[in-house]
Structure formats: C-alpha cells, structure tokens
Image: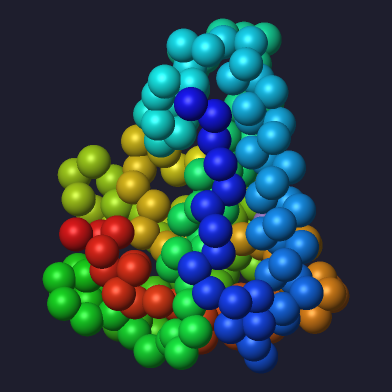
Amino acid sequence: MAYEVPPLPYAFDALEPHIDAKTMEIHHDKHHTAYVNNANGALEKHPELAKKSVEDLLRGINTVPEDVRTVLRNNAGGHSNHSIFWTIMGPNGGGGPSGTLGDAISSTFGTWDSLKEQLQKAAVGQFGSGWAWLLKDTGGKLLIKSYPNQDSPYMENMTPILGVDVWEHAYYLKYQNRRADYVTAWFNTLNWKAVEARYT
Ligand code: MN3
C-alpha cells in the first residue's frame, strides 16, 4: 500500500499567530506531498517494502535495498516526521505536560521550562535543516536529540514524543532567519493530549 498524506486535523490558520496559514498550507500540501510522492516512487520498485508500516521500514532502514535506501531515508523519513508533526500541534495549544508524561519530564528534566530550554537549544543548534525531538528510548528513558535532514528517530529505535521541524520551509515566510523566535512560538501550538498519548 502506498503512503498517503494524512489530512491536516485543523484549518491552515488554526495555529495563527504562531504559525501562519500560508506556511501551513505550503508545508502540508506541497512539502509533505513531495515526500510521499518520492517515497511511493521508490516503493514501486520494491513492492515488498510497501507492505511494512513506515515506522517499521525506517527501523529497518539498513536492510532496505541500496538502490532506494537513501531516497527512502529522506522521503519515508519526511513522511513519518511530518505525519507526527501535524498531530502534536493544534489550536488552543500550549501549556505544559501533565499525567505520566508530566511525571517523567519532572524526574528527567526537573521542569517543563528546563526541557523547553534544552529542546530550543537543540533546535537552534541544528546546523542546516533538520528536527529536534523529545524521544523515548527502548528503556523508556526520555532524551532530547536533533537529527539532520529528514533522518527519523525510528532509525535508532527511538519513539518520537514531540518534535519541531527546523527546515526553513517550516518558518521562513513569517520568521525569516529568526529560527529561535519560531521555536519559542511553536511551543504555543502543542496539543498536549496528543503528545501524552504518544508517550503512553
Ligand atoms: Mn517540513
């Protein structure tokens, strides 16, 4: 089965003023669609790969045939990353974690503000394009890590909890070179219900 771009679960302007409607429209309809189309082109050459979920494909990226490995690392990675990204944001977002995720964040990072500071640092410090993530490792431990390009945390067997896209296409129309301002504003879009569900 070929990949599909999931519908955005809210309107393009739902994250205003933090993320503008035009950026959301181009990001979702053009950029995500391009990742899906490119990945599907590669899957056509190896139909057995299309039977796997995108997460399983990425976990096993090193066993993917070499002729499509890089294209799938970039584009199945892009499809997976963006599919997560749309769902962890939402209208009337912001605030902080509660429940078991809140407890885990307290014991690992002290406070949500301290986690935010570290995630911000990872996001701003990622040279060039990439993502910064809050992840859960196979032992259940939380950690922060940035990845270049569309490399997926699943390639390292991590579970992505929340992450911020720091490709310029994610913020350039509104924030230009001010990546830090974008990340600060992006925290106000977090849909904690969805984030907590990813953790548990
Ligand atoms: Mn993007």
Tell me which residue sits at (49%, 68%) in the image: 9
Nearest the viewer among 123 and 97 is 97
Q: Compared with residue 115, is residue 18 higher up or lower down, i.e. above or below?
A: below
The location of residue 186, given as percent across then percent down, is 57, 78
The location of residue 195, given as percent across then percent down, is 34, 68
Q: Is residue 79 visible?
A: yes
Tell me which residue sits at (64%, 38%) in the image: 36
**Ligand 1 quadrant assignment:** bottom right
The location of residue 151, given as percent across then percent down, is 57, 40
Q: Compared with residue 196, is residue 143 higher up or lower down, i.e. above or below?
A: above
Tell me which residue sits at (40%, 84%) in the image: 113
Q: Is residue 73 visible?
A: no
Tell me which residue sits at (71%, 57%) in the image: 29
Nearest the viewer among 119 and 100 is 100
> Left or right: 100 with respect to 151?
left
The location of residue 57, given as percent across then percent down, is 44, 26
> Left or right: 142 with respect to 50?
left
Q: Quadrant of residue 19?
A: bottom right
Q: Compared with residue 37, is residue 147 higher up or lower down, i.e. above or below?
A: below
